[in-house]
Amino acid sequence: MANLTQLRELERLDGFLLVDKPAGIAFSSVLKAVKRKFNLVKVGHGGSLDAMASGLMVVLVGDANKFTERVMGEDRTYEGRLRLGLKTNTGDIYGQEVPGAVPASEFHPDLKEFKGDIFQCEPRFCSVRREGSAGYEVADTGEHEQFMAHVYRLEMEGVAFRIKCTAKTIVRAIADEMGAALESLRRTEIGKFKVEDAIPFSRLLELELKDFPSWVMPLKVALR
């Protein structure tokens, strides 16, 4: 049971909370859990993360929400794996299979085509996992406009890859263009923030209220 002093400290809390989200839950569920468990009034984020993906989320607490656009604009680094011989309407393994997959024996993508400035369009369909749902659903998000992204680095070893890119780059769209499906994805960096400095979501849920502030990075530290 929280005491009055702890609750007042939480009310005054401002900063950046780095969370390591597990695959299989929506990023919105992480935000709701943080807000509810620690009695926070204002909680935001520095960039969404697909339910099928794991890794770094920057949760903004209190006045840190004033810097949402700054964090959302930071470059990202991901690592993941492809499923060869499969192409879906969502670009990942949880969508509905469609024609056009490149057979595994013929999969030799020219990585130069996916580096530098690239034009992308978010797939119309995406895999979602509703809160309390047992599995993934395919959601129709409508038509999207094309935009330009930038890939600084793309390395592949077999079906494993690592990519550093600008914010909003759609990795599953790159997998789809290669003729494969995204099997797993993990975000490891957002700007200077790294997933190894984040608290695993399961551990976060076990924290006592008195220990929570120590995980929230003060604004003067996060923004320097």
Image (cartoon, grey):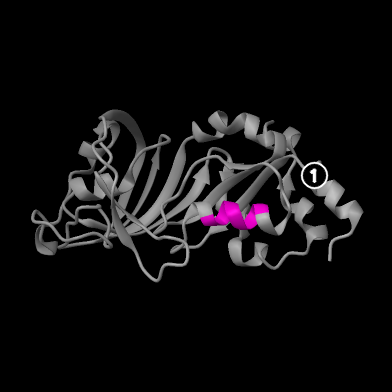
- List the single residue furthest toward the bottom: 134
Residue 167's quadrant in the figure? top left
20 or 111, which lies in front? 20
Task: Please report the residue visible at 67 percent of the width from the left and 56 percent of the height from the top.
Answer: 36
Q: Is residue 123 shown above or below 147?
A: below
* Total numbered circles: 1
Q: Amino acid at mark 1?
A: Glu
Q: Residue 60: x percent and y percent?
A: 63, 41
**Helix, strand or loop at mark 1:** helix
Q: Main secondary structure of the magenta part?
A: helix
Question: Which corner quadrant holds the N terminus?
Answer: bottom right
Residue 204: x and y, percent? 66, 62
196 sits to left or right of 140:
right
Q: Nearer the viewer, residue 123 or 29?
A: 29
Question: From the viewer's perspective, is residue 202 above or below residue 221?
Answer: below
Position of 83 with respect to 169 (left or right) is left
In this orientation, which residue lies closer to the viewer: 65 or 156?
A: 65
